[in-house]
Image (cartoon, rainbow, N blue to C red):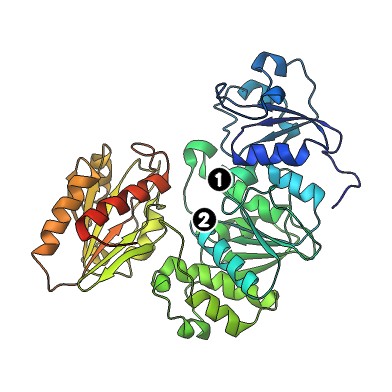
Amino acid sequence: MKIFNNIFLGKKILIYGLGKSGISSYKFLKKKADVYLFDDNQKINLKHKKNIIRQEQIKKINFDRIIISPGIDISNCKLSNFLKKNFTKIHTDLDVLFSFYSNESITITGTNGKSTTAQILHNVLIDQKRDSRLIGNIGNPVLSEKNITKKTIFVIEASSYQLDYSSIFRTKYALILNITSDHIERHKSLKNYVNAKFKLLKSQTKGSFAYVKRDDKLITKRLKKNKYSSKIYKVWTSNLNKKFDKITNKYFISDSNKENLSFIFKIASKLKLNDKKLIETINKFKGLDYRQQIIFDRKNLTIINDSKSTSFASSESMLKNLNDIYWILGGIPKKGDKFKLSKANCKNIRAFIFGVHRNKFSKILKNKLKVRSFSNLQETLKVIFSEINNQKFINNIIFFSPAGASFDSFKNFEERGFFFNKLIKKHTNAKR
């Protein structure tokens, strides 16, 4: 553990946001610094109430550091003015991790595929007897890991929110899988969103390595404009190597998951991983819940739950590789999101749109494919299964990939995915 010149030791610290990352930050720092807690939700039920301070008290204290949770939007929160005045003091749990540990870290970001790529890489490292810890957006909160040794490797899934607020964090290995327009409501512009992603590379020093998608327009444009200290590898995600011939796992039929594997194969050689064991791990990978997850596969029907999809880009890679598709989508459309598949690529796709924003989705899609609209998911599935039952000899695919945020009807994409599975069980009597 690094102690020399640590910027958090013995300091007066405010932790803002008391979700999992905030509480883990408090538990990690409470004996190392003078820590205060605050959350916009004043009714939050905590064991650590004695450390929670009121909003009016915050202005009276001269904090050395402010650690905020990724979910906090500086422009839209109770401490907005205070944070803007003290912007140079803002940090994240990633900064705390970097200040205390000098372990190798592999940090993965991108608009789509972060969680899947991080999970696969973690599994690969574990299967090859490496002490890997999966942290960040996936796995445990950054600061909750125990028994860290010099050999521990951190595999970190980092969102644009985390990177945007981090100020000293840097990683030896950085992966930017792809960048498409996303989270514009929060970042205010596409430029700001790209800036947040590229903080990963900007913070790297000589002796570090970066892996980026080669044929990504936004990534290519940024690389041309700036110089970076790390060694940059451009990953061909469309030119698949011979290792893909050994992949038998149906989970990797989509272009997006093939892209994820391209990064795994590329970094595996740098990490000196065994190819045979690598393939074995990939072929037994079951996928993550609600991310292009096959939940039913019998006779003439395959059902895929991709509730994690919150943009058209995240749905398109799968749509290109499937035939006879009942595509179910709905939710809150992303600002500025565009459907990029050509009309020719949509011949085998029928779109079934549900929810209060169905007219917005319909307006975007109607000139490229057949569209039908429904008030809710239950009604949508009832119609689809009625059609399928009348076409028993045709292979059909129900692809639940909403291409929109879930907050119109659900707490998050997990709740939305779970609800979809419940409805499917009623129609198929499938056991999961």
Q: Check disc 2 and report its element: helix, strand or loop.
A: loop
Image marks 1 and 2: residues in contact by CB distance under 8 Å: yes
> Relative to residue 86, is residue 31 drawn left or right?
right
Amino acid found under the numbered disc labelled 2: Ile
Question: Crowdedness of circle 1 by 10 Å Cα count: few (<14), some, many (20+)?
Answer: many
Residue found farthest to the left: 390
SS state under label 1: helix
Is residue 377 among the parts visible in the rendering? yes
Picture residue at 61% right of the left edge, 65% below the top:
122
Q: Nearer the viewer, residue 201 or 431?
A: 431
Q: Quadrant of residue 335?
A: top left
Q: Residue at x 70, y 40 (%)?
A: 25
Q: Is residue 42 left or right of residue 228?
A: left
Q: Position of residue 81 (x, y in %)?
A: 64, 21
Measured as percent of width and height from the top left, residue 349 is found at 23, 62
Relative placement, left or right, of 270 versus 426 is: right
Taking 262 as reference, is 144 above or below it?
above
The residue type indicated by label 1 comes to Tyr
- Measuring from the top left, give residue 171's x and y in whole percent: 72, 57
* Residue 42 higher or lower than 267, as above or below: above
Residue 193's disc number:
1
Which residue has dot 2 on it?
179
